[in-house]
Amino acid sequence: MIFNFGSINIDYTYRVPYFVRPGETLESGDYNIGLGGKGVNQSLAIARAKGMVSHWGRVSSIDAWVTSELESAGVGVKDIELTPEPSGHAIIQIDALGENAILLFSGANHGFTQEKMKALIAQTAPGDTILIQNECNGLDQLIPLAVSHGCKVIFNPAPMTSKVSSLPLDQCELLFFNRTEAAALLEMPVESSAADLLRRCKESLGDVEVVLTLGSEGAWYQRSSETLFQAALKVKAIDTTAAGDTFVGYFLASRQAGLEPSQCLQRATAAAALAVQKHGAASSIPMAEEVDRLMCQQEAL
Ligand SMILES: OC[C@H]1O[C@H](O)[C@H](O)[C@@H]1O
C-alpha cells in the first residue's frame, strides 16, 4: 500500500491562444471544471495502473463528491477529511501548444495539524511507503516523522518552493523532479544538461534514487552507479496538465508490482504520452489497459 499525503484541488481550466499578460484581459472560448491536484492525480494514476493506494487529504465538505469519485476509482479514502474551509483550487490556462500555466489556491490542503500528521503516521508500519508532493503544509514535520517511523518516503517536490531545500531530502528513498525543479533545488542553470543535473544530485543527495523527467525528451533514472534513460513517445500534445503526475503514479504502481526500474520508466512514459493527448488533469490519466495496448503497439514497431 502506498499512503499518499497529497493535495486535492478543483481545477478551473481555460483554453487560451497564449498566457494572459500583465495588465491584459484575455478571452477564453472554452473552459472546464474538473478534479485535480498533484496529490489526487498521482493517487488516481496509481489506482488506474492497478496499484494499491490510500489518499491522505483534506477537501471542503461542499466537495464531498471527490471522495466518491476516488473511491470508485479504487483509491482508499478513509483518511480524507471533509473540512469547513474551502477546497484547494487551481486556475489553469492551456495555450495553443498544450502547455499550461497554473495559479494555485491551497485552501484545505494547508490545514494539516501536527496531531493529524502524527495520527496518520501512527497507522503505518515500518517499511510502508509514503508519497508526498509539495502542495500540502507541514512537510518539515511529516518527512522526519515518517522517516523516524521507518517508512520509505518518496517525494515529488512540485511545485518547487524555497522551503524544499531545507527538507531532509537525503532521507528520502526516491525523488521525482522535472528539469526546472531539479535546477532550482541544485542551484544550477535551467539549461543544464541532464548529465550535469544528475551528477550534482549524486554529490548532494548521495544514494537517494532519482527520476528526472524532461517532458517530450524523456526521463532519466539514477541509483548509485546505475543510470537509465527512456525516450518519450512522439505524440501531439493538446494538454500537458497532470502528465508528470501520471508518470509518477504509473512509475510507482509498476515498482509496487515488482517491475525493474527500466520497465517502470517504459510504462510511465507510455502513460504520460496518453495523458498529454487528452484534456484535463484527473480526466486525462489513462487506464492500465490503454497503456498496455500502447506498449504492445510500440513493441510491434
Ligand atoms: O500537476 C497538475 C496539477 O497541478 C495543480 O495542482 C492542479 O490542480 C493540477 O491538477
Image (spheres, helix red, strand yellow):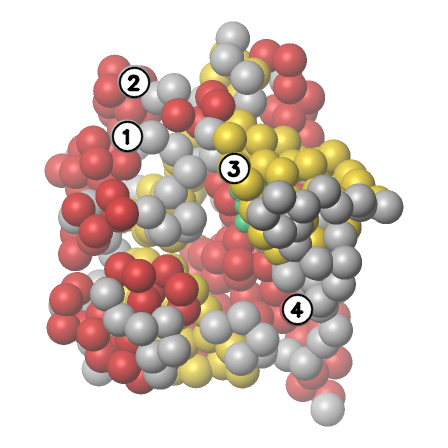
The quadrant of the rendering that contains the C terminus is: bottom right
Farthest residue to the front: give it: 23
Mark 3 against mark 2, which lies toward the viewer? 3
Q: Position of residue 23 (x, y in %)?
A: 62, 44
- Badge number at residue 113: 2
* Vertical position of residue 195 compared to residue 260: above or below: below
Q: Secondary structure at mark 4?
A: helix
The quadrant of the rendering that contains the N terminus is: top left
Q: Amino acid at mark 4?
A: Ala
Residues at marks 2 and 1, CA–CA distance in whole angstroms: 8 Å
Residue 141 showing in the rendered view: yes
Q: Residue at x 23, y 65 (%)?
A: 187
Mark 3 against mark 4, which lies toward the viewer? 3
Q: Position of residue 195 (x, y in %)?
A: 31, 84
Q: Secondary structure at mark 3?
A: strand
Question: Between disc 2 and disc 1, whose residue precedes?
Answer: 2
- Badge number at residue 138: 1
Q: Amino acid at mark 2?
A: Thr
Farthest residue to the top: give it: 84
In front of the other: 49 or 28: 28
Question: Between disc 1 and disc 3, whose residue precedes?
Answer: 3
Q: Quadrant of residue 282?
A: top right
Q: Which residue is mark 3?
A: 104
Q: Are marks 2 and 1 in contact (CB under 8 Å)?
A: yes
Q: Along the horizontal axis of the image, is 167 left or right of 279?
A: left
